Amino acid sequence: MNITIVNSNREFNTVELDETKEYTLGRSPECSVMVKSTIASRLHARLFFRDGSWRVSDNQSTNGTWLNGKKIRESAIANYDVVRIGDVLVEFNDEELLQSIIVNKSEISEYTSEKAAAQNLVLNEFSVKVGELLKDFNEKTNERNFREETARFQTRLTEMVNSYASDNARINSEMKILFELTKSISEILNLKQLLNIALDLVHQIKKVDRGLVLLYEKKSDRFVPYVARKMSLSDLKVDENLVSKSILAYMKNNPGPVLIKNSLMDERFASAESVVALSAKSILCIPLVSQQGLQGSFYLEKDAAQPFDESDAEFLKNFASAVSVAVENTKLIMAIKRERSIRNNMERYLSPNLIDQLTQTSGELKLDGEKREISVMFADIKNFTKMSEQLKVEEVFSMLNKTFSEITQIIFKHDGTLDKFIGDAVMAFFGAPMKHDDDPVRSVMTAVEIIETVKRMADEYRSEFGVEVSFSIGINTGEAIVGNVGSLDRMEYTAIGDTVNLAARLQAKAGYNEIVINESVYNLVKDRFRCEPLPPFFVKGKEQAINAYLIII
């Protein structure tokens, strides 16, 4: 296992790890691996080999140790994982894993030296059959049957190779290489690991000078660099001309590999400044296309003195087919995991019915901060402090849990979002993340049902706790910022802004088992509920008096 340390100034340093040793990482010169970062701790983290794998452990550092974007205390390390220490990245590379995919290096050298044979009709037919097999695999595969379909795919692939067995060593060699690559790629479910291995294999087979894999973003209609070799992703973000947009655009509009033997002599790009600026380069741009359309592209460069040729394009086209299917399946699994994560997170504040509606949308669900018109409801137990003094601690929590369980079900019944419990109060809102035309009405219906439920449970409260329970509720409709707020360790979907604050002020104005709404809510619900105007009153932070109404239950 090797580690590559990438400092903030883009300096690279590679260290080969010894499984018998333990390594310390930090900004202290006494560390085994010194990282040049002012925000790293002196002894930031440890690396050690245990139970057959490398592990990284945070050493109570000030800013934490991050693995693939997630803060960790200790974790096992996989190939192509990235650990962040301060503003320094540490990438892990397992060369032995890569070599195990290519069984016989001599076959690679034989392949690269006998390019003319790649046009053999038998090989072309075999490539077409592999493509058909991959297409069938892609159409039948989903998260539930992925392992089963992968095993079936590999069995059929093996049978196909055997059926095409030939006395021609050249044919057998190429088929075996394509077989090994296709089989290995189909088993990988980590997108970054998949594309890193794919690009490494291309570099080994084709002796590429520079290369990268770009993923295509359909919404923005652009190619985004994802993994690279012999070029820095940071440099690509700063200088997009390092990759010719003209070549990528040509590939997008003319499906199939784009082969340029000499960038200075190709008439198709004679007027493209980004191509001419590359000097004398041979370029091979291979699209990654699956059933769902364009996924991305291999972008490879060599010196024009030893250019790519048609056999390279043909072979890599077939290899790209395998990678495309794997990319699509990986994205599918990632999307399902993301949906599960969203569902698990939302179950705390949304009804199961609303979660089903959200996860069945076309992916337009927005949980980042956005401005929305919502109806905010605050419900508070009246005189709770005095009431709690009469009860034992366990009785207080028992009463709160019993009450809030009922209220939660009522909020969910009307497709509201449960924001939070604040001691003896609950905050909910209607209109995000799912919007309804009658959200203000739903908020008032929820409030009315809460009051009716508390009244219905009055005898139960008296007999079990010996207290009278009543609620005061305030509702306000207006614009607020809604979205996930918090840290990487804990995120909460919430609403913030003046609309929320005023709802809390209205709740404070309400009496026992009363619902107070402001004028914006009244104008939207007055045809559904009996309302009585209250004398205008002032609240903190408002220069003008508030016009409010009492819902008559």
Image (spheres, helix red, strand yellow):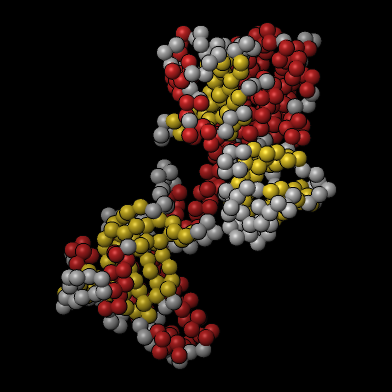
Residue 414 vertical placement versus 228 (above, below):
below
Q: Is residue 383 left or right of residue 486?
A: left
Residue 545 vertical placement versus 273 (above, below):
below
The residue closer to the viewer here, 52 or 468, is 52
Tell me where residue 162 appears, x and y as whole percent: 76, 19
Tell me which residue sits at (57%, 41%) in the image: 9
* Quadrant the C terminus occupies: bottom left
Q: Is residue 75 left or right of residue 536?
A: right
Does residue 392 appear anywhere in the picture? yes
The residue closer to the viewer here, 83 or 37, is 37
Residue 544 image-quadrant placement? bottom left
Tell me where residue 405 appears, x and y as whole percent: 46, 72
Tell me where residue 464 appears, x and y as whole percent: 47, 87
Residue 176 vertical placement versus 506 (above, below):
above
* Quadrant the N terminus occupies: top right
Q: Is residue 238 left or right of residue 300?
A: left
The residue closer to the viewer here, 55 or 332, is 55
Residue 383 image-quadrant placement? bottom left
Does residue 145 appear anywhere in the picture? no
The residue closer to the viewer here, 474 or 11, is 11
